[in-house]
Image (cartoon, coloured by chain):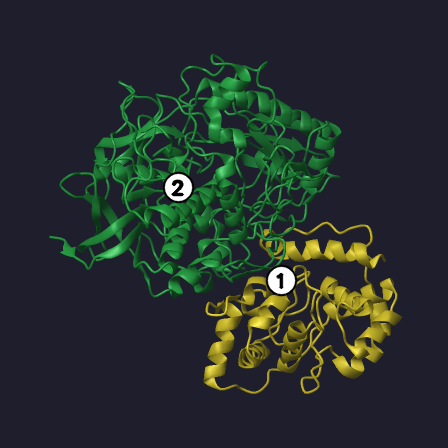
Chain colours: A yellow, B green
Amino acid sequence: MNAAVSSVRLKLLCAVSACAALLLWRPVLGADDAVGSATHGAQLVSICASCHGQRGEGLAAAGFPRLAGQAAPYLAKQLRDYAAGARENAVMDSFAKALSAQDIADVAAYYSNLNAPETRPFKTDAKAATTGRALANLGDARIGVQGCGNCHGPNGRGEPPTLPYLAGQHAEYITAQLEAWQQGMRHNDSGEQMAGLAKKLSAADIAAVSAWFAQQPPPAAQR
Amino acid sequence: MAQRLKEVDVVVLGVGFVGSIVAKELAAGGLKVVGLERGDPRDTVPDFQGPYVHDELRFAIRKALMQDNTREAVTFRNNAGQTALPVRRWESFLPGTGLGGAGVHWNGQTYRFQAADFILRSHVEERYGKGFADPELSIQDWGVTYADLEPHFDRFEYLLGTSGKAGNLNGKIVEGGDPFEAPRARDYPTPPMKEHYAGAIFRKAANGLGYHPYPQPSSNLSQPYTNPEGLQLNTCVFCGFCERFACEHYAKSSPQTVILPVLLKNPNFELRTGCQVQRINLDSTGKKATGVTYIDAAGREFEQPASLVISALFSFNNVRMLLLSGIGTPFDPATNKGVVGRNYAYQTMSSAQAFFDESVNINPFMASGASGTMINDFAGDSFDHAPHGFIGGSYIGAINTNGRPIEYHPVPPGTPKWGKGWKEAVARHYNHTVSMTIHGSSMPRRANYLDLDPTYKDAWGQPLLRMTFDFPQNDLKMAQFVTNKAVEIGNAMGAKVVAGSPRKGPYTVTQYQTTHNTGGTVMGADPQTSVVNPYLQCWDVPNVFVIGASNFAHNASWNPTGTIGALVYWAIDALKSKYLKAPGALVQA
């Protein structure tokens, strides 16, 4: 697969996903899309499972994200971006580079079809919960940040195929990602939106919004 | 009895783009400024957030962001022989209301008029001879030149962060931009938007026909941008909900994103919302304004004294405010005397739809308000009008601002209007159609004007504005000519069927066209044919400035906002460098 071409196409897909969901309209996939086989993917993921869990539920304490039910095009793009360096992670980079285009499609298809148990954690303090919910669904006028739900769906349920769900995702992972956007370790969104808004968030904002999403029920698979 | 408030230096009527920019500049200079806004206060957070903000029924169909015409409407008739009736549901045009004005729900299409527009009568007479333009057209020079305005166009575009590609940098034509544009001192602040597929096939066809396609200038941004006020804008995500909607992403340039946060922090400025201005008050000489009278949301009447009054309202309301206040002589079409309400113009909108087979996927929902590809080859002064017998022109563009489910269902001619056949055609063509916008100039004529309605009143008992308008033959001829060109482009794009819809008369208020209503408080160098002088100062009352599309002496081929923005900064420059140093008439009548 030509990563550059694919990247451009995915940027366009990313842009349209919110509308596509409203319209029940399927974006027309380009000729370079590998069709994923979840069956073959199942044979590839034993190594993934050591961190991301047997059911794709992730591992909160280590900051390993939940993958179950995340949209396949999103997961495939992340793997390609790790391989290309648009997303930096010492462990994932090498795994991603070892996968063929077909492998990536298969692994993505596998995880997108999984349903994992909910892993809702601790309760935060009320003030942080209020801040987190406001950031997630309304944003913050004082710092010029829009609500996360505008792209990631109401309550962070995701806007497949390209915008990941945040509901039920581990707080440690969301926090690490917002910090990665802030620091430039991650720069693989369509228009630098994430870097811009992450830089406006304080550490307390990040902790609050991460904790709030972690407490929401994740969406089911079948997307 | 109105309660008299403490005098301030400046009162600004309307806090949209014009009002917020003027107020910001004057308050920053140390003046005490009050902004009176009839609508509600609102901001990106919390008012414009999803999923509410994408409610197509609420915003696009029921027009939730528009002026409440149960309280304040416009009456309309096609000609002076008819009786005008109030527009009870906005269709043809959609006047906005509320903090930020129409700058909240616009599409972000940000143009400069051509150099010839500002000297229209002189230019037409020089290029085509004195008898060329239809004598019914009351075209005139604006009293200002493009060269005067260039720095102010620049300033407005940099405030907004407009995304585009220059076609003429200091006289040097730049490949890929618009070669017909007037020279600009520097490029746009941000690069053009990504081109959607409709734009790409339009570009290819237009190039093949020898035209000059270029990316539409967009104030929904192509990349993150920090404007000179220090405010940050985000990259547009092509959600397809711009016009009639507010932007949830801080990606559309609006008063809320580019200037209000700075203005509202200035202690010299006070915003009052829910305030319906009744009139500008004059002293006993009638030559000096003493302030304004308004009624607040609780129905209380206040008098706000001020040394300087700036009417920064939508074009209709600028005209109406002067008429209600007795400033300037109302235009009388019978005698052709008077100026207020004269030279009302609109926009001559046509369209062409290119229907493709099912192998061509347009994905129309993948859209932004101003991310089209277009040509100016048949706009304004770009071509030789001599063989055609009309003046003006239209741009043609594959603009594609949305593919929203309630509003967007292109079907070819001959399709049933409802039922199974219609539904099948919508499903068949939704994703395989390119809709071309043909956006045409509107020339003023004596029979088209604005005045106060003799019968109908608003919720506060004041007469409504009455519009008398029909399309001049000049403009209908122009629309037919340019629509034919668009159909040729559609055929060159490889469409199976191309349906051109040139604008036809009579004008109707029941079909959406555009909200580019202009004129009525026209600017100019001659007080016999203008309401405000070239600095947008009232000839008759020098401490009243009127700023907006109502200043346009005609409406050109392009969307008006860029030119309004240039006029605002041009007027501010005159206010700061001339008027405030020596208040009084800047130009002797």
Task: Report whether B148 appears left or right of B370.
Answer: left
Q: Is residue B100 visible?
A: no
Between tags 2 and 1, which lies in front? 2
Residue at 52%, 86% in the rendered image: A124
Could you tell me which chain the residue with mark 2 belongs to? B
> Given the current orientation, which residue lies at the most extreme front position?
B582
Residue B3: horizontal and vertical position, in percent? 14, 57
> Closer to the camera, B166 or A173?
B166
- How far apart are the two marked residues, 2 and 1, measured between alpha carbons? 41 Å
Characterize the local packing of mark 1: few (<14), some (14-19) or many (20 or more) Cα atoms within 10 angstroms: many
Q: Which mark is residue B304?
A: none
> Closer to the camera, A23 or B159?
B159
Same chain for the residues under marks 2 and 1 in the image: no
Tag 1 residue:
A159
Residue B175: horizontal and vertical position, in percent? 72, 38
Residue flagged by tag 1: what amino acid is it?
A: Glu
Could you tell me which chain the residue with mark 1 belongs to? A
> Closer to the camera, B308 or A164?
B308
Characterize the local packing of mark 2: few (<14), some (14-19) or many (20 or more) Cα atoms within 10 angstroms: many
B135 vs B52: above or below:
above
User: Quadrant of residue A34 in the image?
Assistant: bottom right
Tag 2 residue:
B548
A199 vs B427: above or below:
below
Quadrant in the picture for the C terminus of chain B: top left
User: Quadrant of residue B462 in the image?
Assistant: top left
Residue B580: horizontal and vertical position, in percent? 32, 50
> Closer to the camera, A73 or B39?
B39
Task: Report whether B517 appears left or right of A16.
Answer: left
